[in-house]
Image (spheres, helix red, strand yellow):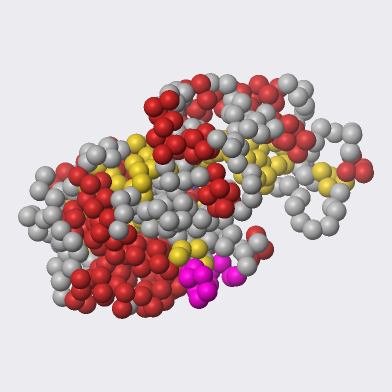
Amino acid sequence: MPAPAEFLKFIDDNASKFVARLGAAVAIPSVSGDGSHRPDVFKMSAWLDGQLKDLGVTTKLVDLGEHKMDGQTLPLPPAILGRIGDDPKKKTVLIYGHYDVQPASKSDGWDTEPFTLVVDEKTGRLIGRGSTDDKGPIMGWLNVLEAHKALGRELPVNLRFCFEGMEESGSEGLDDLIKSESAKGKDGWFDGVDCVCISDNYWLNTTTPCLTYGLRGLVYFKLTVSGPARDLHSGGFGRMVHEPMTDLIQVMSKLVAPDGTILVPGVDDLVSVADAEEREIYEKLDYSVQDVEDAVGAPITISNDKATVIMGRMRMPSLSLHGIEGAFYGPGAKTVIPASVSGKFSIRLVPPQTPELIEPLVFAYVEQEFAKLNSKTKLKIENLHGGKPWVADHKHWNYEAASRATEAVYGRLPDLTREGGSIPVTLTFAESLGVNVLLLPMGRGDDGAHSTNEKLDRANFIEGSKLLGTYLYEVGAVKA
Ligand SMILES: NCC(=O)N[C@@H](Cc1c[nH]cn1)C(=O)O
Ligand SMILES: [Zn+2]
Ligand SMILES: [Zn+2]
């Protein structure tokens, strides 16, 4: 069933107001991975809760307890559960999103202040941290609610919401909440949910809308090498003592080869090799090596073969080195031997890999490589967090509804993609609720989520809001 014309018109007519609301959301620096911003994550939860209530949604803030991060005990931001509509004749759709964001600072290389939404009138870009990941899509749902409230129109489905503030830091506490609510059956918040929709990923390229039926899993490690009791002068102690940074870099250099091959024995071996038929799926996608180069801003793809490059993101595991905590990195030439350094790396997982299968392989290999150094420094390895990969049935009516909605809004059928990123809660919803989960992205492949100058194109924000609403009408019309 097509969305009513007055709904689509309302979205167009109120575009500036919607952009301003996105600006208000971006202005709250709700960075979950930095303890000093934890009050901002709480501020964001209160702001979003207020918006939902104003739009007629009944909400409940669930306290998820505390957690330890970087030696601090911190309160976890609440999960916001919401509900609107209780018509037994209608389908019930559960919407998930996250209101926390990745860290950002001008000194990382942003051209503008990351927590001030900048509207670039020339390019139509809405630039700011969280614009595409994931505040823009959450605002998209608010836009749909606002249109229906203002027009005095009933929603075509019952809606349930689950918004969290820890997605970028391992979704602490959320799995337990979903499992306990599901176990309550009829009295649980998610009772009666027919399907789940998550808008928290991106088109492959900049022009072709897509539906996403797979996500990679993740397992994130922290590798600490410590030695002297304090930082040392390299003139005073260089070549007299074992140095933590030297040892850490030796071990980290053994994790992954420049061509992306994971060197931890057994990790790549768990994954099957794509046959000719499967390669063809990737060959046919509307995504080229040039698109990748455009998105990353340089000709640095691992291969010139399109299918190999795309499979690297969609159906292969990858190991990335992220950073070294405790290392000297400022300007100048400080001649220090850091006393303790922690290397951060993570592995993106694909079926049948799971964090439980990968952790022992990594621990054993890292310890073995460290032992080969014959160093008197000390090594500690920790698994910070993880999540399993997820693949859904893309022939389900939930996907068919989204496909029709995409055609109605964008005038073309969507590509079907698997995403390289991770949203661990996706699998928890699929398993605990036993329903189909759809990923319906709003932004483009060059949005720069997690990167500097993150943006969401105004056209994607506005057409994307229409898409979310139209999808609800298509679900509402499903007879199954
Ligand atoms: N938009 C989804 C996303 O960015 N997910 C993160 C999840 C994560 C896990 N640990 C840190 N972040 C991702 O990196 O894929
Ligand atoms: Zn996200
Ligand atoms: Zn993210």
223 within the magenta span: no
Q: Residue furthest left?
A: 89
Residue at x-position 13% and y-position 54%? 477
* Camera-nearest residue between 263 and 244: 263
Identity of the residue drawn at 36% across and 75% down = 15
Whether residue 122 appears in magenta in the rendering, the answer is yes
Main secondary structure along the magenta-highlighted residues: loop
Relative to 13, is 249 above or below? above
Q: 403 or 468: nearer the eye?
A: 403
Q: Residue furthest right?
A: 235
Task: Please identify the quadrant where the C terminus is shown.
Answer: top left
Quadrant for residue 79, please give it. Answer: bottom left
Give the residues in magenta. 112-126
- In this rendering, the answer to whether 16 lies above or below 428 is below
Q: Is residue 424 visible?
A: no
Q: Total number of numbered labels?
A: 0
**Residue 167 location (% of width, % of height):** 43, 51
Residue 66 in the figure: left or right of residue 371 = left
Name the quadrant of the N terminus: bottom left
Q: Is residue 297 above or below residue 289?
A: below
Q: Position of residue 302 (x, y in %)?
A: 61, 37
